[in-house]
Image: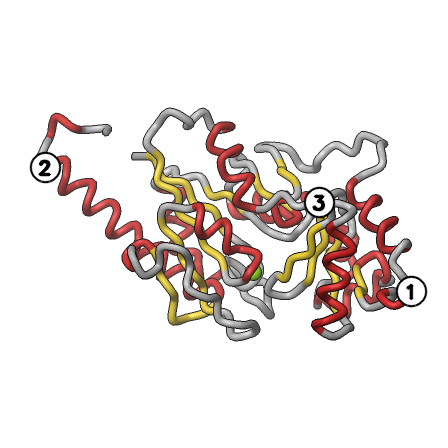
C-alpha cells in the first residue's frame, strides 16, 4: 500500500500567524524516512511554493498551486508563462466589467500595492513579489454584505469564474479545485493502478473537496475561522476523519504521527497474519 499526503499550507502545515512549520518537523521526518510523497496544496503561487517545497525536501513531488487552479510539476521552480493572456488576467478583466453596484466590494491582490499586500498578509516585500506572480487565481477580501456576495457570485459564474472562501482569503478562479488535482498527481506519479491510500489535511472551506476525496482526512483546528461542517462520510466512518485539538503545525504533527502509527501497525499486523499477501 503506497501512501500519499496532500496538505494545505496556511493554518495547516504552516502556523496561521508566523508561517512556521517547526512544530511539524517530527511528522515531516516520518514522511521523508518512509519515502511518502508530500503534495503541498495551497492558495499560494508556484513562485511561493517552490522555495518552501525545496526547504521541506520534497522537490521530487508536484504541488497544487493557487487553490487547485494550477499545478507546479516536480523539480520545476515556476510554471512557464507562455506569453498568452493568463486566467489571472481574465479574472482581473472580468472584475473591471462588474455592474456598478458590485464594483469595489471585492478587493484583491491586483488592487493593492506591494506595501498594502505586505500589510494584509504579514509577508515581507520580497515574499510579496512571489505572492503576486499569479497565473490562475485572485485572492482578496469581501467588503459587501451577504446578499451582494450572492449577486457577485452569480454574476461571476456567467463568466465561468468561481469564488471560494479560504481560511484567510476569498479567492476567484476558473474553478479547478485541490481535489481535481489529486487524481492528476496520482496518475503523474505512475500510481494509477496501484493500491494507494490518500491522506489530506486542511483547515478551511476551500479544503473540503480535497478532504472528502481522500481516504483519510485530517481537519486541522482553525481558531481564526468557522469550524468546518461534518464531511460526507464523517458519521459513517468516524475513523477515517480526524479533527485535531491543536491548530496549525502542532495539530498536523500529531495527526500524521497518529495516522502513520495506525496504518503501519495494521500493515505489519496483516503481513504477520498473512505473509503471502505482502505488497497487496
Ligand atoms: Mg488553510
Q: List x then y, in percent, for residue 134.
A: 76, 47
Q: Is mark 3 within 8 Å of ligand 1?
A: no
C-alpha span from label 3 to label 1 = 23 Å
Label 3 or label 2, whichever lies nearer to me, is: 3
Residue that label 3 marks: 174
Residue tagged 2: 272
Answer with the quarter of the image where residue 24 lies: bottom left
Q: CA distance from mark 3 to mark 2?
A: 49 Å
Write down the residue under mark 1. 100
Is label 2 in a helix, a strand or a loop?
helix
Query: Which residue: 9% across, 32% down?
Result: 274
Q: Quadrant of ligand 1?
A: bottom right
Name the residue rendered at 71%, 64% in the picture.
150
Q: Position of residue 165 (x, y in %)?
A: 63, 62
Secondary structure at badge 3 equals loop
Say which of marks 3 and 1 sits in front.
Answer: 1
Sequence-wise, which precedes: disc 3 or disc 1? 1
The residue sitting at 47% across, 43% down in the picture is 38
Q: Residues within 10 Å of mark 1 (few under 14, many from 20)?
A: few
Circle 3 crowding by C-alpha within 10 Å: few under 14, some 14–19, many from 20? many
**CB at disc 2 and ligand 1 closer than 8 Å:** no
Please provide percent x and percent y for residue 48: 67, 49
Compared with 23, 199 (above or below) is above
- State which quarter of the image contains the N terminus: top left
Relative to 74, is 174 above or below?
below
Q: Secondary structure at mark 1?
A: helix
Amino acid at each position: 500500500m503506497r501512501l500519499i499526503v496532500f496538505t494545505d499550507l496556511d493554518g495547516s502545515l504552516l502556523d496561521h500567524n508566523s508561517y512556521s512549520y517547526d512544530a511539524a518537523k517530527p511528522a515531516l521526518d516520518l514522511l521523508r524516512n518512509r519515502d511518502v510523497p508530500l503534495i503541498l496544496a495551497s492558495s499560494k503561487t508556484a513562485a511561493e511554493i517552490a522555495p518552501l517545497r525545496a526547504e521541506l525536501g520534497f522537490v521530487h513531488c508536484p504541488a497544487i498551486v493557487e487553490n487547485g487552479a494550477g499545478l507546479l510539476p516536480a523539480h520545476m521552480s515556476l510554471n512557464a508563462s507562455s506569453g498568452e493572456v493568463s486566467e489571472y488576467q481574465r479574472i482581473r478583466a472580468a472584475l473591471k466589467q462588474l455592474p456598478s453596484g458590485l464594483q469595489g466590494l471585492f478587493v484583491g491582490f491586483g488592487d493593492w500595492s506591494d506595501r498594502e499586500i505586505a500589510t494584509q498578509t504579514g509577508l515581507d516585500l520580497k515574499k510579496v513579489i512571489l505572492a503576486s506572480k499569479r497565473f490562475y487565481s485572485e485572492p482578496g477580501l469581501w467588503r459587501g454584505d451577504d446578499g451582494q456576495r450572492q449577486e457577485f457570485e452569480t454574476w461571476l459564474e456567467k463568466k465561468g469564474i468561481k469564488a471560494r472562501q479560504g481560511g484567510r482569503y476569498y479567492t476567484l478562479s476558473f474553478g479547478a479545485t485541490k481535489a481535481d488535482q489529486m487524481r492528476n498527481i496520482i496518475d503523474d506519479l505512475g500510481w494509477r493502478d496501484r493500491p494507494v491510500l490518500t491522506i489530506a489535511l486542511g483547515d478551511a472551506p476551500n479544503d473540503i473537496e480535497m478532504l472528502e476525496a481522500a481516504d483519510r482526512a485530517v481537519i486541522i483546528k482553525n481558531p481564526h475561522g468557522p469550524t468546518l461542517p461534518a464531511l460526507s462520510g464523517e458519521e459513517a466512518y468516524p475513523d477515517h476523519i480526524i479533527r485535531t485539538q491543536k491548530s496549525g503545525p502542532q495539530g498536523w504533527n500529531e495527526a500524521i504521527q497518529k495516522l502513520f502509527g495506525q496504518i503501519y501497525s495494521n500493515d505489519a499486523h496483516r503481513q504477520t497474519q498473512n505473509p503471502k499477501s505482502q505488497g497487496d
